[in-house]
Each structure stands twice: as C-alpha cells, then as structure tokens.
Amino acid sequence: MKVEPMEEFEQELRQAFERRPAPSSLKQRLMKSRRVHQPRSHVSRWQRLAAAILLTAVLGGGLVWRNREEQRKGEAARQQVLTALRITNRALNQMNTQLAAHGRAQRQGD
Amino acid sequence: MAHDWQPDFEQLVDEHQSMVFSLAWRMTGDRGLAEEIAQDVFLEFDRHLGKIESAAHACFWLRRVTMSRSADALRRRVVRGLDLWVEMEEHHGMQLEPRVSPLGSRLEGLLATLPESQRAALVLRYQEDLTPEEIAATLQAPVATVKSNLQRGLKLLRAKAANHLKEYIRGEEYAREG
C-alpha cells in the first residue's frame, strides 16, 4: 500500500517528537524542595488557623464587652434621671406645703 | 465529591516527569527554563493533589498546567525583549540527538519557528498523541481553532522542512562537486 506524503511526514513528526527523558536532577531537586516546603506550609496553615480563631475570639469578646458596657451606661443614666425626678418631686411637694401654710397664715391674719 | 484514588506523589513524578519536561522544552526551546517550569508544575501539583480525582485527571492537569506555564514563560521572555525565535533555534540546533534522523532532529528546530498556538497544537498532537478534542480541552480553546492550528502548523512545518531538505541536498551536491 502506498503511503501518502503527508502521512509519511506525520510519522516522521511522531518519531521526532518522542518524549525526552527528564534530567535525573529534576526529581532530586523536586523531592528536596518538597521536603523543605512541606513542614513549613503545615505549620503556617495551623498558625493561620490559630490566628483566625484568636482574631474571631478577640472581636467577639470586644463586641460582647461593648454591648454590656452600653447596657450598664444606659442603666446608670436611667437611675440618674429617676433620682432627679424624685428630687424635683420632693422639692415641689415642699413648695406646695409651704405655699399652703403661707395661705392659711394669711387667712388667719385677716 | 469523594474519590477513592490514593495518589503517590513520587510515583506520579516518575510516571510524568518526562512528559512535563518534554512539553516545556518543546514549547520554550530552553532546557534550563523547561526544568524550572517542570519543577514549578510538580510543586503546584503537590499542593493540588487533594483535588485530583484519578490518574487520568492527574495527567490532564499536568499537561494543561505545563502548557499554560510554558506560554506564560514565553510571554515573559518576549516582554523582556529577548530575540526568542533566534534563541530557540540555537537551543534546538545544539540539542540534536543521534537516535533521530537528520530531518527528524531538524524538525524540532523548525518547530521553534512556528507561532506559539500552532506549536502547542502540534506538540500535543505528535508528542502526546492527543485528538483535536483532547487538545482543545487541554488548551481551553475551541476545537475548530485547534483543528485550524494543526492544519496550518503542519503545512507550514512541512514547507519549512522541504526547503531545509532542498538546501541540505544542494549543499551535499556542492560539496561533492567541490
């Protein structure tokens, strides 16, 4: 059977483009580099995880503290207002009593 | 998705290093750069090993990333202003192997003078024996584009090889006459 020129050329290409063996140093360097990088990457992964947990805890704690602080300040302000109202109420009562006594004294004088 | 495949990195390196290195070398035309690319590709592969689902997936991943890294390396060199084509021809010219015929060994040098997309398609077709559909998946390109690159690259390479052969025969005749 006659082989077409293009098929022959493609056959030539397949032979010319066979895989070449990789240099033996490639695997050695690769395994060495892997050994060097692997433990560090594991440590840094744990460190990243720990840092993330710590940061979340600090932020969460901060939020809770701020909430409680705001509640405490609100309660203190409420108490102050109530005290002020009580004082005002007492003063007004005293004023009323004095005015009533003054009125009675005036009527008796007349 | 869960998968039962238990990859052994060292075994995978043994199995695929020649493929990765040859792809990178033929794409860049630089042995040193090809070694660097192969090393980077395998280190990245190691980091992605948990996501690899099968031996075929590993092979596909390695081919795809090698081609992409080689293309990146070529672009970086063009940006740096190196005369890549001359350099690649010189590199290929220096690496002739006795096991290949004179035309065969010269074909590798001529491959370096083709546009990158045609070179990528031809290397995957004739080194890796992939179909146009598999090449398209590897290069993430449309099948029609890959087929066109294969046809054009093959035609161009054949024309260059024919010219080279004519020059070679003329040179031989001239040497005999002289």
Image (tube, coloured by chain):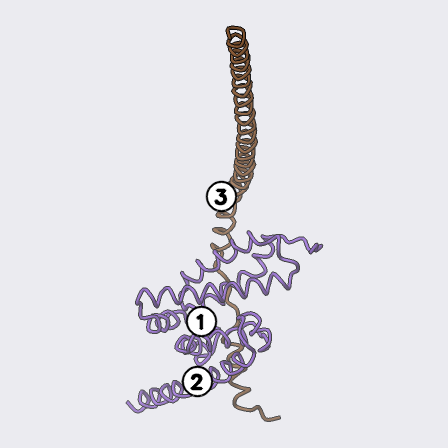
Q: Secondary structure at mark 2?
A: helix
Alpha carbon distance from label 3 to label 2 = 46 Å
Asked whether the residues under the numbered discs 3 and 1 touch, taking CB atoms below 8 Å apart as contact, a structural biologist would say no
Residue drawn 47% across the image and 65% down it: B24
Badge 2 density bin: few <14, some 14–19, many ≥20, Cα 10 Å: some
Decide which of A17, B85 is in the foreground and name it: B85
Q: Which residue is mark 1?
A: B97
Q: Earlier in the sequence, mark 1 or mark 2?
A: 1
Same chain for the residues under marks 1 and 2 in the image: yes
Tell me the kind of residue under disc 2. Leu
Alpha carbon distance from label 3 to label 1 = 36 Å
Badge 1 density bin: few <14, some 14–19, many ≥20, Cα 10 Å: few
Decide which of B50, A100 is in the foreground and name it: A100
Q: Colour of chain A?
A: brown
Read off the chain for label 3.
Answer: A
Alpha carbon distance from label 1 to label 2 = 23 Å
Q: Which residue is mark 3?
A: A36
Task: Give the left or right position of residue B73, taking residue A71 as reference.
Answer: left
Read off the chain for label 2.
Answer: B
**Residue A92 spot, x, y in % from top left:** 53, 17
Read off the chain for label 1.
Answer: B
Decide which of A104, B92 is in the foreground and name it: A104
Same chain for the residues under marks 3 and 1 in the image: no
**Residue B115 spot, x, y in % from top left:** 42, 77
Q: Which residue is mark 2?
A: B156
Shown in purple, the chain is B
In the depicted structure, whether residue A7 falls above or below residue B78: below
Q: Which mark is residue B35?
A: none
